[in-house]
Amino acid sequence: MLKQIEGGVTAAKGFKAAATEANIKYKGRTDMAMVYSTVPCRAAGTFTKNLVKAAPVKWDQSVVYDRGSAQAVVVNSGIANACTGRDGYEYCRKTAEAAAKALQIPSDSVLVASTGVIGMQLPIDRIEAGVAAMAPALSDTREAGHAAAKAIMTTDTHPKEVAVTFTLGGKTVTLGGMSKGSGMIHPNMCTMLGFLTTDACISRKLLLEALQEDVKKTFNMISVDGDTSTNDTVILLASGLAENPEITEKNEDYETFCEALRFVNTTLAKMMAGDGEGATALFEVTVQGAKTWEQAAVLARSVVSSSLTKAAIYGHDANCGRVLCAMGYAGVDFDPDKVDLWFESKAGKIKVIENGMLTAYSEEEATAVLSENAVTAIADIKEGTAEATAWGCDLTYDYVKINADYRS
C-alpha cells in the first residue's frame, strides 16, 4: 500500500545530502547541494531534447548511459554552465574529481547538474570549495534533504520534495525526490532538474524503462512558458538497500514500483507547474473521451500552453473560446461540435460549453470558480475512453518582470 511520508532525497535507505553557501551567483543563501549514497547505485536518467545541451547534461548522459551506475550528485544554482564550450565540460570533470576525492569514490560515478543563467562560466574554485565543504556535512536527516532542496532553487518560491513508502516482496521500500523548476518550463522530455532516490532493488534496464515511460505522463505534461531548457535533467538512483527480491521482469512488484514513481513524479510536476514564475494559480487541463492517450495528451498540452488561456485564468475570466481555439490548433483531429467543457475548483464546477456551444452559465459563478488558487478545465471530446492531464499556471504581469531582469 502506497503511503506518503515526510521527506525527500534522504528518505530512502543509504542516501545522505548536504548544502552550502558557495557564492556562485547568489549572496546570503545556499546555492550548492550534494546527494550521496553509501553504496553504488543503479542509475537512470532523462535529459533535455533541446539541441543546445548544457555541459552537465552531456556529462551525465555519459555516466548514465555508458557506466549505468552512480554514487553522488553535485548541483549548483545561479549559473547553468550552458553554452560554455570545452571549458564548461572541463568544469564538470573538475567538479566530479573534487567530489571523488572528498568522498573516496570514482569520478565517473559522480553526476553533476547546474541551473541558472546561460552563457556564464562557473567559478570552479568556488565549486570545488563547495564540494569540500559539503562532503563532511553529509547527513541522512530530513533537515539535510530539505536543505538540499532549498539550495537548488533559482526563481522557485519554495522547495519541492516528496517521499512515499510501499511494499515489494514483503520488504518496506522508500522512494523520494526533490526538484526545481519555475520558469523556462515546457513539455519536451522533462523540463526541470529532478533527483529521485530509492532503496528498491531493481534491474538497471527496468529502472531506466520505468523512468522514461513515467516522464511522458508527468514531467512531460507540464508547461509554464513554452521554453524548453538547455539543462533539463531527471536522475533516478536505486541503492537496493531495501533488500527486496530484485525486480528483473514486469511483474506485480514492477507495477507497484511504477505506481510509486508515478505518484512522486506527478506530485513534483504539479508543484513546479503551480510555482511557475509570477503565477497565482495552478492550471490543470484534463481531456477525456479520447480515442487514445496520445490524442488526449496533445490536446491537453496545447490548452495548458496557450498564453491567451493562461491570461484568462489569471483574470478569472471564463473565456472558454480560447480553450477550444487551443485544442483546434493542437494538430490532432476531433469534432468541435461534440465538445463539452467544464471549469472546476474548490468553489464548484460549472459547464460552460455543451456540444461545441456556450451554455447559459452564470458569469458570476464562473468567476468564483476561476478565482481559486487551483483551477481545472475538463474537456470531453466524446470519441473514446482515453484521457490525459496536463499542468500549467496562469500568466501574470510578474512573469514578464521576473524575466526582464533575470540576469541582474
Image (spheres, rainbow, N blue to C red):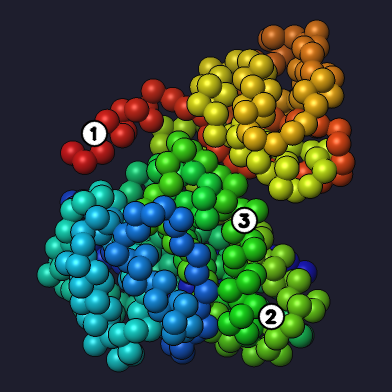
Sooner in the amino-acid sequence: mark 3 or mark 2: 2
Q: Residues within 10 Å of mark 2 (few under 14, many from 20)?
A: some
Q: Quadrant of residue 124?
A: bottom left
The image quadrant where one finds the N terminus is bottom right
Residue plotted at (75% across, 71% down): 256
- Amino acid beneath label 1: Asp
SS at badge 1: loop
**Alpha carbon separation for disc pair 2 and 1:** 47 Å
Q: Residues within 10 Å of mark 1 (few under 14, many from 20)?
A: few
Measured as percent of width and height from the top left, residue 373 is found at 57, 31
SS at badge 3: helix
SS at badge 2: strand
Residue carrying label 3? 216
- Which circle marks residue 332 in the picture? none
Measured as percent of width and height from the top left, residue 71 is found at 41, 83
- Amino acid beneath label 2: Thr
Q: Determine whether 76 is above or below 158 in the image.
A: below
Q: Quadrant of residue 254?
A: bottom right
Sooner in the amino-acid sequence: mark 2 or mark 1: 2
Residue carrying label 2? 172
* Closer to the eye: label 3 or 2: 3
Q: Are marks 3 and 2 in contact (CB under 8 Å)?
A: no
Measured as percent of width and height from the top left, residue 158 is found at 42, 48
Measured as percent of width and height from the top left, residue 141 is found at 45, 73
**Alpha carbon separation for disc pair 3 and 1:** 32 Å
Residue carrying label 1? 405
Residue 33 seen in the figure? no
Q: Determine whether 351 is above or below 73 in the image.
A: above
Give the side of residue 340 with respect to residue 373, left or right. Answer: right
Sooner in the amino-acid sequence: mark 3 or mark 1: 3
